[in-house]
Image (spheres, grey):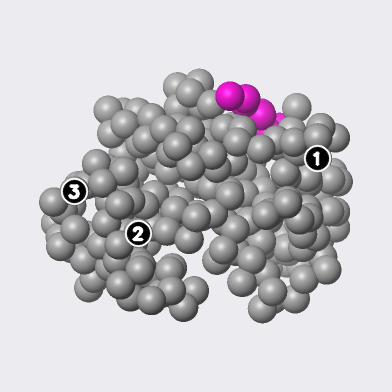
Amino acid sequence: MQDNTVIIAKNIYKSYSTEQKKETPVLNNLSVEIVKKEFISIMGPSGVGKSTLLHILGSLDNANSGLVRLKYSENWFDYENMNSEQLASFRNKAIGFVFQFHHLLPEFSALENVMMPALIADISFSAAKEVARGLMNDVNLSGRETHKPSELSGGEQQRVAIARALINHPEFIFADEPTGNLDMKSAESVMNLLQSIRDKYEVTTVIATHSKEIAQISDRICNMVDGSIE
């Protein structure tokens, strides 16, 4: 382990049961370490387990066995030693998520969508609004704050989602196929934005993608084969 390692996943095994109660392995003895401020792509075809791995690293899902540790605010956190409430609190503070489908709330404006995680974390409305405005500027959406998601393009919606992921000043960004629904020009724009966000906010960034072109922008590419990383 390097001195600046901030994510450790060791011997991760994950399986799902079918209706016939047959166990289907998805992740098989997978191990990976990621260092602080690294921009890493987990690459592989659909169904190889990229999203499952990302969800386990982000505590959205549990492994059947194995160890997941994240170093946040200079302290190590072991998921297996945390209950659901502790994990939810940790996620809200330490991790920002960006998904293929933006999951923006349609009845709220872009600015209000960005503010939402901060309000959930009991940040005052005025403080959340101020930070959200700054983030909207960072993702090049100044002047679009009052627009509803339906009034934004797919690329703009994903930029709102990225700003939302940053609102609580996380140390980690996990992005699951963040360009999957975008044309190539918009996809490249979003990836360049994620890279600039990494540089400005010094966040460790892990993306799952099936695209070699998109993965090329990262510092390191981890190829998934048969539920493990090559």
- Where does the N terminus fall, quadrant-wise? top right
Question: Which residue matches tag 2?
Answer: 131
User: What is the number of callouts on the image?
Assistant: 3
Three-letter code for the amino acid on which mark 2 is drawn: Val
- Whole-percent x, y for residue 210 in the image: 51, 33
Q: CA distance from mark 3 to mark 1?
A: 41 Å
Q: Nearer the viewer, residue 208 or 115?
A: 115
Q: Are marks 3 and 1 in contact (CB under 8 Å)?
A: no
Tell which circle, 1 or 2, labels the residue nearer the N-terminal end. Answer: 1
- Frontmost of labels 1 and 2 is 2
Q: Which residues are magenta?
A: 219-225
Name the residue at 61% across, 71% down.
Answer: 89
> Residue 124 vs residue 79: left or right?
left
How would you rate the neighbour count of disc 3 (Cα within 10 Å): few for under 14, some for 14-19, many for 20 or more? some
Q: Nearer the viewer, residue 122 or 114?
A: 122
How would you rate the neighbour count of disc 2 (Cα within 10 Å): few for under 14, some for 14-19, many for 20 or more? some
Magenta residues, dominant SS class: strand
Residue 46 in view, yes or no: no
Q: CA distance from mark 3 to mark 2?
A: 13 Å
Question: Which residue matches tag 3?
Answer: 142
> Residue 23 vs residue 98: left or right?
right
Q: Nearer the viewer, residue 138 or 205?
A: 138
Tell which circle, 3 or 1, labels the residue nearer the N-terminal end. Answer: 1
Question: Which residue matches tag 1?
Answer: 31
Q: CA distance from mark 1 to mark 2?
A: 36 Å
Above or below — where is 81 with respect to 96? below
Secondary structure of residue under mark 2: helix
Secondary structure of residue under mark 3: loop
Three-letter code for the amino acid on which mark 1 is drawn: Ser
Name the residue at 50% across, 21% down.
Answer: 216
- Frontmost of labels 3 and 2 is 2
